[in-house]
Amino acid sequence: VDDLPVPQQIRITNITCDSFKISWDMDSRGRERITHYFIDLNKKEKMSSNKFKHKDVPTKLVAKAVPLPMTVRGHWFLSPRTEYTVAVQTATKQPDGEYAVSRWSEIIEFCTADYSSIHLNQLLQKAEAIAGRMLPFTVFYRNQQREYFQQDRCSCLMLPSVKDNSGSHGSPISGKLEGIFFSCNTEFNTGKPPQDSPYGPYRFQIQADVLFNKTTNIYFGDFYCMYTSYHYVILVVAPDGSQGDAFCKGRLPALDRSSNCFLTCTEKEDGSLSFHHAQDVILEVIYTEPVDLRLGMVSQISGHQLMSLSTANAKKDPSCKICNISVGR
């Protein structure tokens, strides 16, 4: 309908992982006839999208004309960290129940945000519910191929790298936080690290107190599974005041170093430190600073390389009721 104003200069603000506010400008001509807005929201199709999969059904929201900006929340299952396109029409509801509409506005793009602290605390509570009892451990370890440890430069440092996109899609550490992955889980019957690993036959071991002590802070990073019964908890260990520590503050839930459900460091009567890890989840510990190989030892493990257990860029099971929360995945 020519006399209905077309939305112009669309603005998207207050973006979260599952909501946003939308506003726009309109000519005054015909504005008094507007009773509704039509909003067309679609996931932005990437060049790598599988052309043989069914595309998302385009969803148009019919909303009563309210003062702008209008909050859009709960009308779609918005996913965090996802690019969307949006366009708007103005409309007037006619006596027969049909709508007369304006032309579509221009299409604009925006991206939803990471999980907020509220969502991460919901994930944390779910992880705490299944963590199980605590078992003692003494070393952190990291498996890789032999070449990884044969560093031919003067420095013997393992350097932090950017975390991949494994785990929850809305995790604020994926693709942003730099660190080095370590494990600490032990076998129930031996109390020692397992002899199998998905990451390589060579293992670097370092005493736990070198990385985790009274001068380091610990944060909860993520909770996920990969279509199996195993559940993974990502923790971040960062020296107090370090660049990694600054990244985590305000983004991730901080844990009590000596009293949490996943990884603890407590002082014994003689002043030495005691370490425990959760039994029923697989811990992935990200240490945010470089680590000198000379502070530990590298040896070959006797077990197999179980590639099927690798979490490199692993996608989270969106249907798991244990590790998903009500907003996006």
Image: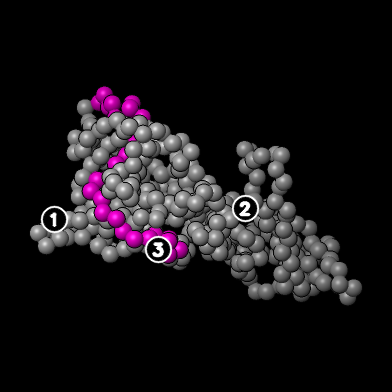
Q: Which residues are magenta?
A: 126-153
Q: Earlier in the sequence, mark 3 or mark 2?
A: 2
Residue type (three-letter) at the residue carrying disc 3: Glu
Task: Give the residue displayed 70% in from the left and 51% down from the top.
Answer: 56
Magenta-drawn stretch contains 133: yes
The answer to which image quadrant residue 35 occupies is bottom right
Q: Which residue is mark 3?
A: 128
Label 1: state its secondary structure.
Answer: loop
Horizontal relation, residue 139 to residue 18: left or right: left
- In this rendering, is residue 323 above or below 284? below
Q: Residues within 10 Å of mark 2 (few under 14, many from 20)?
A: some
Label 3: state its secondary structure.
Answer: helix
Q: Which residue is mark 1?
A: 272
Furthest residue toward front: 189
Task: Give the residue displayed 34% in from the left and 61% down from the top.
Answer: 133
| x and y percentages locating residue 172 in the rendered image | 44, 54
Magenta-drawn stretch contains 301: no
Along the line of sight, the residue nearer the viewer: 203 or 21: 203
| x and y percentages locating residue 295 in the rendered image | 19, 38
Label 2: state its secondary structure.
Answer: strand
- In this rendering, is residue 256 above or below 190? below
Task: Give the residue displayed 21% in from the left and 27% down from the top.
Answer: 154
User: Of the residues tagged 3 and 2, which is closer to the observer?
Assistant: 3
Which dot marks residue 84? 2
Q: Label 3 to label 2, Cα distance in Å? A: 33 Å
* Observer able to see residue 259: yes
Q: Residues within 10 Å of mark 3 (few under 14, many from 20)?
A: some
